[in-house]
Amino acid sequence: MAELKREELAVQQERLMLVRVLLPDEPADSRDPLGELRALARTAGAKVVDEIVAKRPKPHPGLYVGTGKARQIAERCEQNEIDCIIFDNDLSPGQIRELEEITNCKVLDRSELILDIFATHARTRQSRLQVELAQLEYTFPRLTGMWSHLDRHGGGVGTRGPGETQIETDRRLVQKRIGAL
């Protein structure tokens, strides 16, 4: 499979799987728990191919879904040639990375999908800048692991140490852009 690209959030024309984890303390629309997320995915121009609703007593710390459900999601992604999985729940950066590794699919959460829709529909300069700021603030804590193939760079002859890591460079650049906006 091709390398996962996190910098492009567009889900247009991708084959999607929608996933929602129902927790005991959360009210759910029992008739159609994925109805709103399905509508958001259609607004983004995506094709919903598969849906999974799972109940859990509490979120799994590493995957949000359990390990068995994660394997089931991976199998169904392969069977249905899924490109992207969208969770109706908010996921941590670590959970997104773990799920992407297991499923070999791009994983988004509800917030990332909504930001993508806003970016697609932003027309004025001010609205585009507001969306860019929101995307940068959302992406900033998720930079870890995006550049795992790069270790340290920038150290030269006569300098101490190997230089800054790619993530340090990216964080500095994102903070600078957030400050400018």
Image: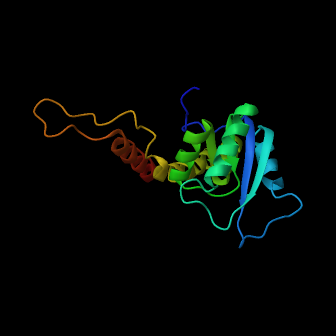
Query: Toward the viewer: 107 or 140?
Result: 107
Where residue 155 appears, as percent x and y from the top left, is 20, 34
Q: Is residue 181 above or below residue 83?
A: below
On screen, residue 14 versus residue 61, left or right, reads right
Query: Toward the viewer: 101 or 133?
Result: 101
Going 44% across and 49% down the picture, which residue do you hit?
Answer: 180
Viewer can see residue 122:
no
Q: Residue furthest left?
A: 158
Q: Residue furthest right?
A: 31
Going 36% across and 47% down the picture, which residue do you hit?
Answer: 172
Q: Is residue 172 above or below residue 49?
A: below
Q: Residue furthest top?
A: 2
Where residue 89 appears, as percent x and y from the top left, is 67, 57
Quadrant of the snapshot with the N terminus: top right
Count of labels in the image = 0
The colour style of the image is: rainbow
Going 64% across and 54% down the picture, which residue do you hit?
Answer: 111
Q: Is residue 24 above or below residue 105?
A: below
Viewer can see residue 174:
yes
Rendered image quadrant of residue 145: top left
Query: Toward the viewer: 134 or 143?
Result: 143
On screen, residue 65 versus residue 156, left or right, reads right
Q: Residue furthest bottom?
A: 25
Where residue 26 appears, as percent x and y from the top left, is 73, 70
On screen, residue 28 versus residue 67, left or right, reads right
Q: Is residue 92 above or below residue 83?
A: below
Rendered image quadrant of residue 151: top left
